[in-house]
Amino acid sequence: MQKGSFISASSKPMLLIILVSGFILPRISTLSRPHHLMVPHFNPFPGEQSYQQSINLALQGRAEEATRILYNFLVNARGDSTVRRAYRDIYDILSVRERREYRQAKDKARWLLRFWRHNDPTPATLVNERYVEHCKRLAYARKHFRSPQPRGYDDRGVIYLRYGPPDDKYVSNLGESTRDNESWVYHRFKDVSFDFVEFGGVFWIVNDLRRAIVPVNNKLVILTHLFEERSQLSLAYQITAWQLQQKLLGLNHNSVESILQYEYLQRVDKVKVSLPTRTSDFAPEEKSLPFWAMTAAFATGYFPDRMRRASLSTPGSGPNRKLTRLELYYAIPLHKIFAQKLFNQKGPALLDLNFAIFDKKDDLVLQHHDSLQLDLASVLAQNDYLGQLTFFLEPDTYRVALDFLSRKTHQRGLMQIQMDVQDFSGGKLGMSDIELASEVRPARQTDREKGFIKHGLYVHPYPYNAIPREQPISLYYEVYNLQPDTSGTTRYTVTYEVEQRGGKGVLAMLSALNPFGGKKSSLSLLYHFTSKDRHRADYTSLDFSRLKPGKHVLVVKVKDEVSGQEVSRRLKFNIMP
């Protein structure tokens, strides 16, 4: 289990505390290495020199340094000419909406910073592969598709910047009868094609290859040749060439305009409409390492603080109910790791864990790195590594990026999760998210090393996206701000509902021990509770053995019988056969 915690400050006032815990089931692997918060380094290159240095480093393959200097330049830039240059360098890969956003942005350097962070395929790491790729594409375009235009490249360069090198291309020169022309085809994008014709030493994109024909006789013959020599590139070229051949033989009475419009342009334009503004060729070099993750949000300050964070509170802060405790649970299937490579090499068997949190504007809230140490017995036993990350955040929308890397086995798992962190700070009835758990019970002294303790309960998270029908499952949730009656007693009801998504109606099975067992099917189940507590940590066990396989929705509703207020939460899950 990992032990440790740290505090990080973001651009707005926020106390953010991270606790990381994890263990291998059923064996416990203890980790006690410190956490290291990734903070920006001082950038010695100001303005233009800084931006150019970043590009040079990207072209040299020094991706981490290139990313760091770019980010630091944009953080410290204040609307100088270099910011405008950085915008011009990406202008051709931006959508109309993004260009409008940039024009309207008050802090244009911050907009560029958010753009690159949003488009980073591995945002949990210190390397932005998409930025490095763009630098390389830009350098290639300016070298191989030169143009006297200010951007330094012609229309071929625009397409290259957006989609990378074509899967196929044809360069044509039929002599004096045509201008230089070429066509690019991207088979990975449904055979979409782009045609270019040279005018005045610059290649321009065209929608009609007839523009490549100089004023000569036999234009139909030349046009047919232009499509025939491209017939191996795609079906659109092939069909158009055949129709033009039939026109030459007098067997097709449609006009040339009609043939081009219906056999070529409509086919190609249909695909172009669905094309994204830009694409990336980035793909992890490592083989895939699957893992599962799930989140749940809880209030802070309502219960006696039994979590291991007392030493981390800021002076005078006390319980802070404006912060929400967000827990992220993950499970790594160790049987998917190549054990022979992992343990036959020198050094500890480690998994690198990188994670980062971004707000809804793509501003970085926190970035962090840690290592998980594995033991051979657990890997050979094919157990899962189960871990938990705990964040204390202001209510808002966040994006969390996770990145697990096994350097020895050359395996990697990537995931991004969008989360809406609720605000529990008000005095009205509130309810946490529903946490799936494989076990919930009163905590024992021996459970403290596992780290999954909440308010005196041991809550063993179940972060998987599917539940076998025979798997015992528990629910854990918290209820806040129940109103007491005149005798100081709180009274509330809890209703459980299960809906089968895509199916007919609702299926809920009862058993003697929990709300979902036995033979009776019901739309909802109602339970009454009384207590002396205004805030409750509740749990119940479920039996899904008689649910049909497929997608389901669980709804838990809480009604305060004293105040009349109601609150509910939903949880989607899949039942496996």
Image: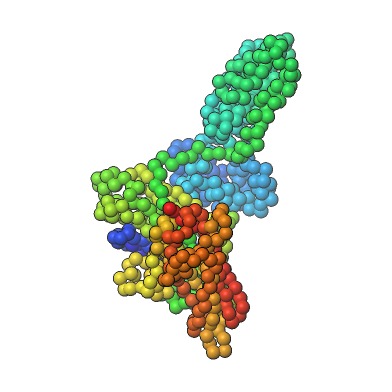
Residue at image location 60% in from the left, 46% down from the top? 83
Residue projecting furthest to the front: 519
Residue at image location 58% in from the left, 71% down from the top? 567
Q: Position of residue 503 (x, y in %)?
A: 55, 54
Q: Position of residue 496 (x, y in %)?
A: 52, 68
* Type of colouring: rainbow
Q: Position of residue 21 (x, y in %)?
A: 38, 63
Q: Quadrant of the N terminus?
A: bottom left
Residue at image location 53% in from the left, 66% down from the top? 522
Whether residue 185 is situated above or below residue 68 in the rendered picture? above
Residue at image location 52% in from the left, 28% down from the top? 167
Q: Would you say 513 lies left or right of 377 here?
A: right
Q: Would you say 170 lies left or right of 270 here?
A: left
Residue projecting furthest to the bottom: 487
Whether residue 173 is situated above or below residue 406 in the rendered picture? above
In the foreground, 9 or 291: 291
Answer with the quarter of the image where residue 158 lies: top right
